[in-house]
Image (tube, coloured by chain):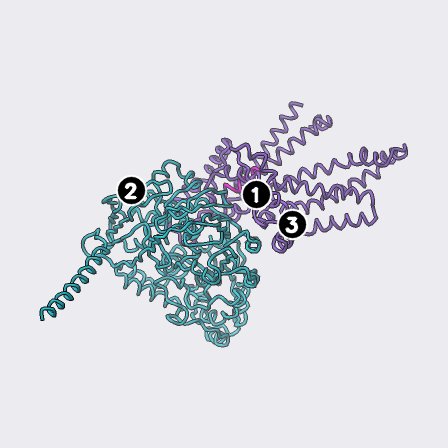
Chain colours: A purple, B cyan
Amino acid sequence: MKKYILLRAFYSVITLWLLVTIIFAMVRLTGDPVKMKGDVGADKAYLERIRHDWGLDQPLYRQYTSYIGNLVLGDFGHSFEKSLPVRTIYFERLPNSLKLGFAAFVISMVLGVPLGMLSALRVNTWWDNVGKTIALLGLSMPGFFVGLVLIIVFGVQLHLLPVLGKGSSAFIWSNPSTWVTFWFKDWQYLAMPAFALGWYFAGAMLRITRSGMLDVLGSDYIKLVRLKGVPEQVVIAKHALKNSMIPLLTLAGLNLLIMVNVAVVIEVIFNWPGVGQLLYDGLSNRDFPMVQGVVLMSGVMIVVLNFVIDVLYGYVDPRIRLSR
Amino acid sequence: MRKGIFAVISVLILLLDFTSAKLIAAAASKPTPILSGPLAKLDIKDAVIETARGKPKGKLTIAQHFALDPGWLDPLEHSYVITQQHYDYLVHDALIKPMPQGEFTYSLAEHAEMTADFTKAAFRLRPGLKFHDGHPLTTQDVKWTYENYKGVNFKLFHDKLQRIEIIDDRTIIFHFKEPFVQFLDLYNGGLSGIGWIVPGHYYQKVGRDGFKANPMGAGPYKFVSQEAGVQMVFEAWDEYWRRSPGVKTIVVKGITDLTARMAGLQTGELDLAYGMTGKLLPRLMADRSLRWDRNFTGPWWLLFPGYNEAGSPFHDKRVRQAVSLAINRQFLVKQETQGIGIPWGNWVNQENRDALRGDGKDLPVPEYNPEKAKQLMGQAGFPNGFDFEWYVPFVPYFDMGERILTDLRTVGIRGKLQVLEGPGFRAKMAQGRKGYPGNRTIVQNVGPRPGGAQAEIGVYAVCGGSASFVCEPQIEKLWAKHEASVKPDERDGLIKAIQRILIEEYYFVPIYLNPFVHAVGPRVLPEGDGFHRYWDTLHAPYPWPWEVWEVKE
């Protein structure tokens, strides 16, 4: 098992190194960020000074080696556009993204899973039709559309909810008292963006729960359990639901990562200060260190999650670790 | 008789008294000279100081239309982005800067001089100046800022400087190696960061990153906090020398999405939002709870990269003229700006002192005459028109590009729209003609640039310009003469002559004055139309100075 874990860890490091290298090369294909900073008509000396400050006057291999060297030391570089260390800005934003991502995740699960189960249990009834309609709307109505409708109805017309930002609550790493309060304050700011983000994923959850439940309910062992005369509630709760959850939980984990890292559109519409906006701003302004930093951190989250899942699979199913 | 003589003498004494009193007052108000010898005539307006100090109240929440850069808080690394001045005017202060009363207005300095040969400049600071931490602001800080400045034009400033002489805590003289005619233009707070005085003691203590994260200055507002890219909070500084700021707290948010800014205004979460021109402008105008200011920033204009190559259809002046004649500016203004733009006959920002006006006063408003355009096309050898490669609109004004393309098609000039993203467009523009391969392209631009028409010409319209689109011998001759001249009137005349050539030869085709609409919510005072006064500062795309703003509590 130890060998298996070490091997998975090695693969993870290789994956991250590849990611870092690819993103390092890709951002440099987008053009020269110095020209953007300088704007039209900038004097040469000023541009050269910026180029030097940003290390872009170095040969590419040197830029790469110094980038990797700094990464090893935990330094993501300085943002070209926001003029401060990427690490500082990223970790200032990350709690906001986690808050939005978790809230949207809860909404997607609370809406999607029970409705999916209901659809499967009342298949081809009007309950099922309602469920399928909600799933269809969830998957076909883009988040920005749902977001704008929410803003117009609950913000502009009814004046019930604020439409901009996250409120005054902040997660301050140096202040432990904010570590808990942050998650429970300013829910009114969170409600609309979380719903707009979670809505799409609720549709996906509903679909996968429904199809998973239908598969399980049609399987031989469920038939056998029913033949044994086990009460229907027990059949569903103990035997069907548990087994139908396996693909659902795999998808849920992935969805959560997506909601945390790439909720760009929702963050822009609601001016939510998350890491998605950082990536968007970074791409819009050729902010190489910022794009590299955000992509790397998203990659780290995915790789770590996969690593944990792989290790858990190894524990759960010995055939997997033996086959590798 | 005696009585009569006594009365006459009394009147004479009184008159003499009155005259001498006036003379003494005049002598007292005339500042003591710093430099000797003949001096250049400077037109710097006096600051308006309000002695009755009110109490700041209320909160003003502003939506900037892009993500906020903490780097804007550091004048030492001043960029070309004009938005940086938004923050200069909040936290910092300059020796002289544009204010509502004039492009050059005394601020930290109460007196300035320049020798007639432009080799020395001197300033006297106001008494009792200090930074937000109470540390006195002296000529040492002015010197430190100059010496440590690394922003735009820093090399020019350092290359020209011979030495800095500090006479006392309030008097400073810059000695230049050669005539530095542009010094005051460039040192003015409206053009670069070097004139905005940074507290050397604090900068050295907290370092470069520390200063950007927690800046300090001598401006009307103290920095309180920021979330990089998202929000900055400023608090009124009661001890600001000119007056007490009207608003207690100013919060600036970076909100890129127009719909979000509009919603924020409508819900009352925002009091002032920038960049409201666009598809939501009719909604803004229809909302009775909101008010807006046209805020003209500069004219739209077309350029023809590669026009001077023989193979280009735009090589012929008649074709360029046909382009101008084909554009229905009135219709464009109605469609794009709900009729608040103004068709304009020059490509340089109308507020510049050396700009020719394009409303018929100096240059005619361009004519709309598609029939004449077709005739000119026929005379130029294109009776059936021609296809050109790309029409490149300024990002994100793609609708406007489509409308202009439609106008051009009606006279036989057929092209396709090339949609670029913002960075791509700016990078291409920064290269000038070299940014556009081939010679059959039309580029649409709007470029309000501080520094007047001379700065615009120096960038776009001379062979050596960093983004040169025009390279013509007759312009080069005038430009060389301008660069060699130390006579302000002569320089002004030469710049105007170049503008006239550029327009009359259709090297550039102006379209209309662009309103960069700003909107305010109901909390902003004064109620009614009086709020337009916040946009009175010349060349200001944003409504500074901030200390004059007032809101309801």
The label nearer to you, 2 versus 3, is 2
Between marks 2 and 1 in the image, the one whose residue lies nearer the viewer? 2
Foreground: B245 or B79?
Answer: B245
* Circles 2 and 3 in contact, beta carbons < 8 Å: no
Q: Which mark is residue B69?
A: none
* Residue B262 percent coordinates (x, y): 56, 56
- Subunit of mark 2? B
- Which of disc 3 and disc 1 is earlier in sequence? 3
Report if residue A295 lies within the magenta region. Answer: yes
Q: Is residue A25 placed above or below B49 in the rendered structure?
A: above
Residue A215: x percent and y percent? 81, 40
Residue type at mark 1 is: Gly
Of residues A253 and A103, the one drawn nearer to the viewer in this rendering: A103
Residue B140 is marked as 2
**As displayed, is residue B445 above or below residue A87?**
below
Query: Which residue lies under the disc numbered 1?
Result: A274
- Give the CA separation, mark 1 to mark 3: 16 Å
Element on which disc 3 rests: helix
Magenta-colored span: A289-297
Q: What residue is shown with label 3?
A: A143
What chain does badge 3 belong to?
A: A
Is any atom of residue B443 visible in this view?
Answer: no
